[in-house]
Amino acid sequence: MKHRITQFALLVVTLMLWQGSVYSATSSQAPINIAIVGKTKNDSFYQQSYKGCSRFARDYPNVNCIYDGADDYQDVRTQVLIVKELLRKGIDGLLISTTDSQFLVEGALKQAAKKAIPVITFDSDLLPEHESYRLTYVGTNNFDFGMALGEEAKRFKSSEKQFICLQSGHQTTPNLNQRIAGVRHALSGQSEKRLSGENGWVEHYRCPLYTLGRRSDALDQLVTMMKYPDPPIFLAVAGFAQFNPDYINRMSQFKSQIARQQRVIISADTENSQLKALQRGLSVTNIGQKPFEMGRLGTELLHQFITQGVKPVQSHYYLDYHYCNNGNVETCTTNH
């Protein structure tokens, strides 16, 4: 009996020493700097991704999250310059949402590869021919997301020949183009060309509208369309106009028409500003993503690779999405 007690005491002491050595090793580890670069910096979507990284870092004190992006709109050159500057200063991993795949790879990711800096894309992936420059992708399946937006538009088809206007950001951005393709496929069964009457759907002659992520342009485009006597269904494949702080003020003039479905606005994303507009009856449906989890999981996968050499087992980590409308706006999602 005495021998067993001695063995147990020895085991406890050994475990305590092991835990102490692990704590000491963890606390003395060199900092791990992980950069989160969105298409734009002043976007609450990407700020949530940064918060996801920060949440992971709470459990790993040596992980530092660095947030950056083009200041005001989707500028492909600025994104490349930011990444090059981060590489010059010294980072250990990069989590990035792609604005222009070709430009990003040629301008910065080839340099990252030479420096052996691991890259994971989130929200917007590289094009298939460039996937060798990243470990994996974390985010929404953007074609399926576009399909979901298109299926939602079907609910508001009010005539045999229904016009629709799609609003996007930059013409070369992979995830937005995949969403447009998904919308077209949902409505017509094909995704390669503009809608021209298939299944009764026609794209407005002025559309798609491209905003480059400029909120003022996005809102101006939306207001212009809503002022048409018989406007098309307006479907934005990202937040754009609804991220503009003047959205509620300028769109209030259409509130009664939106309530009667004489004006239909469907938008991707469910940021707080968008939910406020939805709650006030200034949008009919928003389909949202999980930017916080994109940042958290992307950081976790980078950390595993940096510290253990463990590559992600999947080429794509797809996250689900959710639907918000005026009836469930208070419970449909949680923003961080």
Image (cartoon, rainbow, N blue to C red):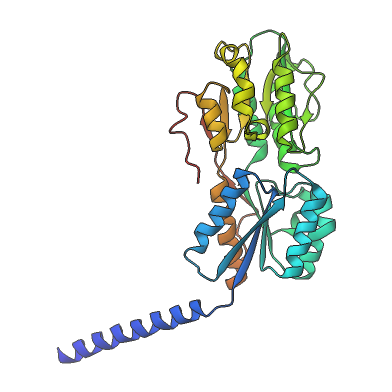
Check the image and report above or below for 73 versus 262.
below
* Residue 134, horizontal then vertical, whole percent: 71, 58
Image height check: is 61 above or below 265?
Answer: below
Residue for point 77% across, 48% down: 127
- At horizontal 62% and vertical 11% (from top left) the residue drawn is 262
Residue at image coords 45%, 79%: 22
Instruction: Specify whether 270 is left or right of 187.
Output: left
Counting from the top left corner in percent of width and height, residue 303 is at 58, 66
Q: What's the residue at 28%, 88% (across, down)?
A: 10
Front-most of 328 and 303? Answer: 328
Q: To which quarter of the image does residue 233 belong?
A: top right
Q: Quadrant of the N terminus?
A: bottom left
Would you say residue 189 is visible in this rendering? no
The residue closer to the viewer here, 111 or 74, is 74
Q: How many marks?
A: 0
Residue 102 lies, in percent from the top left, at 83, 50
Q: Quadrant location of residue 226?
A: top right
Location of residue 156 with respect to 91 vertically, above or below: above
Query: Do we see residue 330 in this rendering?
Result: yes
Horizontal and vertical percent position of residue 309: 62, 71
Direction from residue 137 to residue 335 in the image, left or right: left
Q: Nearer the viewer, residue 102 or 336?
A: 336
